[in-house]
Amino acid sequence: MRPLFFLLSVALVLFLPLASGAQSGGQPTAVALHLITADVSPGTMVEFKGMLFFSGYTAAHGAELWRSDGTAEGTVLVKDINPGPAHSNINYLTVSQGQLFFSANNGQLGQELWKSDGTPEGTVLVKDLYPGPPRPGGYFEGIGGPEYLTDFGGALYFSARHPDWGRELFKSDGTAEGTVLVKDINPGPGDNHPLYPYVRSSVPSHLTPLGDWLYFSAYDGMHGVELWRSDGTAEGTQLVLDLYPGRPERATFGPGQYGADPSAMIVYQGMLYFHAMDSLHEGGLWRSDGTAQGTELIKDLDPEGMSFIYSFAVVGPTLFFSANSEAHGYELWKSDGSPEGTVLVKDINTLDSPEQHAKSSYPADLVAYAGELYFSAAEALHGRELWRSSGTAEGTVLVNDLLPGPAGSEPVALTPLGNVLLLWCRCAGGWPGPLCL
C-alpha cells in the first residue's frame, strides 16, 4: 500500500481518535488514519445496507456509483450508469423505503430519478420526469433534475422539473406510476419565460421532515420565497407564514416578491430551526412549531448588518451552526434555543491569508461524532483542515494537520459510519487527494 501523503488521487481512509486525548490551543490532536483505497476520487457518501455508498470518480468510468465495506477489496463500482469516461453526475444519495435513491444522468435522458438495491441489475431509472435529451449548454445543462431528496412518511419527496408544471414538489414510492406531483404550488409551466425560467415554478428547497409535516421553502408567485409545509397531499400543502411581505423581487424568480428566503433548516428541540429575513432583520436564527403564531426570531446575529447561516448540526443538547457577522466573518456559533444562549463559539481564523478570505474560517460539513462536533475549517497557518468542538472556545481545536502548510487538505463529505468518521481530503500532489478518515 502506498504511503498516504504520496498519493496523487483521492483515497478512502478511516479516522479514529486515539486514547491519548486532544491537545488544545490549535495544536493537532493525535488520530489514527487507515487508508482503504487511493483509486477513487471524492463525492457524497451515505450508509446503506451496512456499507458506504458514494459517488466516485475514475478516469475509466467518470463519476459513478460506488460502494465500500471498509476494505480495498470491498470498494467496488456498483454500476457505470453513463458508460465510459463520461459522468453520471450522481447527487442527493438518500435512503427511503429500503432503497437508495439519487439523481443521475445516463447520457440520454438528462438528470432524472434513479434507485439502487446495491447491485448492478438493481440500479435502475425510476422515472423520466422531463422527457427528452438534456438541453445543450445554458443554465439547465447538467442540473434541473431531482433535488433535495428526503425520506418522509414512508415515501421519497423531492423537488423536480416537469414540462407542464416547472420545478415543483414530487413524491415517489420507487415506481414510475407512484412518482407523482404533490402540488403545483406556482401554477403553470416554468421553463418558457425568456428571462425568468422559474417565474411559474415554486422551486421547493431545503426539504425537512418534522412530525407529520414536511417543511420547505417555496415561491407561489404571490408571497415570495417563504416557509411552507406539506402532509403529502395537495390540499395539505400550505404556506406557514408570510414572514417578509412585500420584499422586492429578485431576477431568479422574476416579477413577485423575494420574501424571507428560509434556508438551512434542521429539527432541534422538537421544532424547526432555520435562517430567514424579515423587514426588521437582515438575517437571523428563527424557529417554528408549524404555525404562524409559533414562528419567531430567536436572534439577529448581526443587528448592524446582514447575517447568513449555511450549515447546522445537533450534538447532544446543543445546536451548532456556521454563520457570518460583520465583526467575525463566517465562524462557528451555537444555540440552546434562547437569545442569550445563541453565541459565537470561537473566531477560528483571525489572520488574513492568500488562501483564506476576509479572516473567516468558513466552518463546513458539520457532523456529530463521538459526542462532539466535527467539521472542516480554514485558518491562515494550516489552511482548511479537520476540526472538532465541545462547544467552548478552548474545546474547539484542530484535530490533525493532514496536509501541512497554508493550503490545507480541504476535507469534505464528513460521514460518521459506526465507530469511524469518513471524509475525503487532499494529500500531497494536489486536489482531488486521498479520502481520509
Image: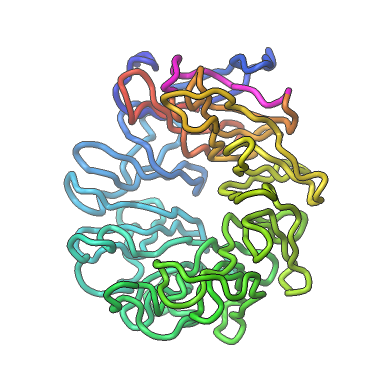
164, above or below 194, in the image: below
103, above or below 360, in the image: below
Which corner quadrant of the image does residue 21 belong to? top right
Q: State which quarter of the image contains the N terminus.
A: top left
View extreme (front): residue: 304
Residue 225 shows up from this direction: no
Please state which of residues 91 and 309 is positioned toward the viewer in this rendering. 309
> Within the magenta stretch, is there residue 133?
no
**Residue at the spot 38% in from the left edge and 15% down from the top edge:** 5
Q: Which residues are magenta?
A: 394-408
- Give the main secondary structure of the magenta stretch: loop
345, above or below 278, in the image: above
Please state which of residues 172 and 77 is positioned toward the viewer in this rendering. 172
In the rendered image, residue 13, in percent from the top left (x then y), is placed at: 45, 26
Residue 319 shows up from this direction: yes
> Within the magenta stretch, is there residue 404?
yes
**Residue at the spot 67% in from the left edge and 16% down from the top edge:** 25
Please state which of residues 177 and 129 is positioned toward the viewer in this rendering. 129
Give the number of marks.
Answer: 0
Q: Is residue 108 left or right of residue 258?
A: left
**Residue at the spot 25% in from the left edge and 75% down from the top edge:** 131
Q: Is residue 273 left or right of residue 111?
A: right
Which corner quadrant of the image does residue 200 belong to? bottom left
Q: Is residue 367 left or right of residue 425?
A: right
Rendered image coloring scheme: rainbow
**Residue at the spot 19% in from the left edge and 39% down from the top edge:** 60
In the rendered image, residue 175, in percent from the top left (x then y), is placed at: 40, 73
In the rendered image, residue 271, in percent from the top left (x then y), is placed at: 74, 61
